[in-house]
Image (cartoon, rainbow, N blue to C red):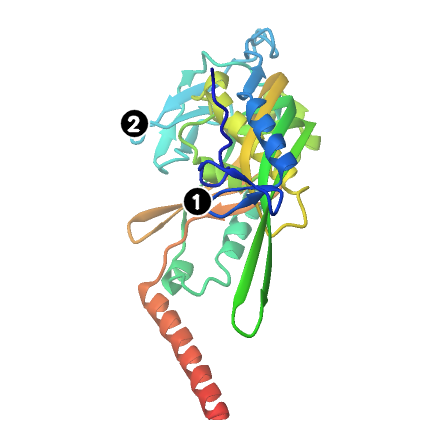
Amino acid sequence: MEALEYKCPNCSGGIIFDSTSQNLTCPYCDTSFEIDALVQFNQSLENEKADSYGWQDYTRESGTGDWEEGELDGISEFRCPSCGGEIVGNPNTVATSCVYCGNPAILMSQLQGMYKPDYIIPFKLDKNAAKSALIKHLRFKPLLPKSFKDENRIESLTGIYVPFWLFDCDVDASIRFKATRTQVWSDSEYRYTRTSYYLVLRDGGMSFEMVPVDGSEKMDDEYMEAIEPFDYSQISDFKTPYLSGYIAEKYDIDAEQSKPRANARIKTSVEDIFRSTVKGYNTVVTENSNISLHDGKIHYALLPVWMLNTKYKDKIYSFSMNGQTGRFVGELPVSVGRFWAWTFGLTSVFTAVASLIYLLFM
């Protein structure tokens, strides 16, 4: 015969019925639970399910198929001998620089072994816009070395179509939150705090379109996500003329390898959206979430990115700009002298303010 014991959701201790409050009470952490709420909590634990993801496999049949005769004519593939980065060019790309390390490169071989993209977002911003964005990015940076601005020279500036996998799906989700409300009051002797705990459940469904996952192992995933979002209302069916004058990179992370990252991005978005509907509490913590993803479809697309490299004191600093919207990100050097000057300046201000307050109230 199996014995039944109710466990405290907070500390897992055995809880007992308190006849005075008519609630269940934990003797270990002194937390009180309404009976109906605890029954509902236990039922939610019993009904928890594992996540399920229903993606289709991306194949030539589900995409746009094989390349048509003549479409690959003149397209070239090159692997940089310095860093191993792989870049893809078109008939107008003969001499260029590696977008990863800035070394000069000549594209010679023919492109083979990749899916034909389903979609492409054409470049909307030109090279001058990328240069202007870098100048703007350097403004109002008090810790930036002055010589970096004065001596700044762009080592390489390349427009590159980066491979992305785009995920569409419908999602059904069930999420359990633990929420609290805190009351504080005091009398002549003591200060009291009462914390009430709540079980909050959310169930619902939503749809996602064009969730992007970078398909290049060499591109910085944080940079690629930082320059999002792209405006997918301007996406077009892929045509090779869009590549003219730019470099196109071949994916080296396939659709199957990209699914876990897509799953994580979708699950995080679902939890954030559901969390935004839980209002009126002091704290809200996600305790369990279950998503069931279905009707998943995958598309292969090339999205426009400007890559900038600039050299300062023998180090290459890289920047990325969304070639459609102009969103710009990148790493900057820090002047040690300016850092300490800034720190001491703030310390002096705080000291002066503290001294003034002391004099005023003494």
On the picture, is 167 further left or further right than 354? right
Q: Residue under circle 1? A: 28
Residue 184 location, x and y as percent? Answer: 58, 62
- Give the mark toward the camera: 2 or 1: 1
Residue 172 sits in quarter: top right
| Residue 122 shows in the view | no
Mark-to-mark CA distance, 2 and 1: 65 Å
- Name the residue located 63 percent from the left edge and 50 percent from the top edge: 281
Residue nearer the viewer, 55 or 355: 355
Residue nearer the viewer, 297 or 101: 297
Of the image marks 2 and 1, the number of the one nearer the N terminus = 1
Q: Residue under circle 2? A: 81
Residue nearer the viewer, 134 or 201: 201
SS under mark 2: loop
On the picture, is 236 further left or further right than 93? right
SS under mark 1: loop
Residue 226 location, x and y as percent? Answer: 52, 42
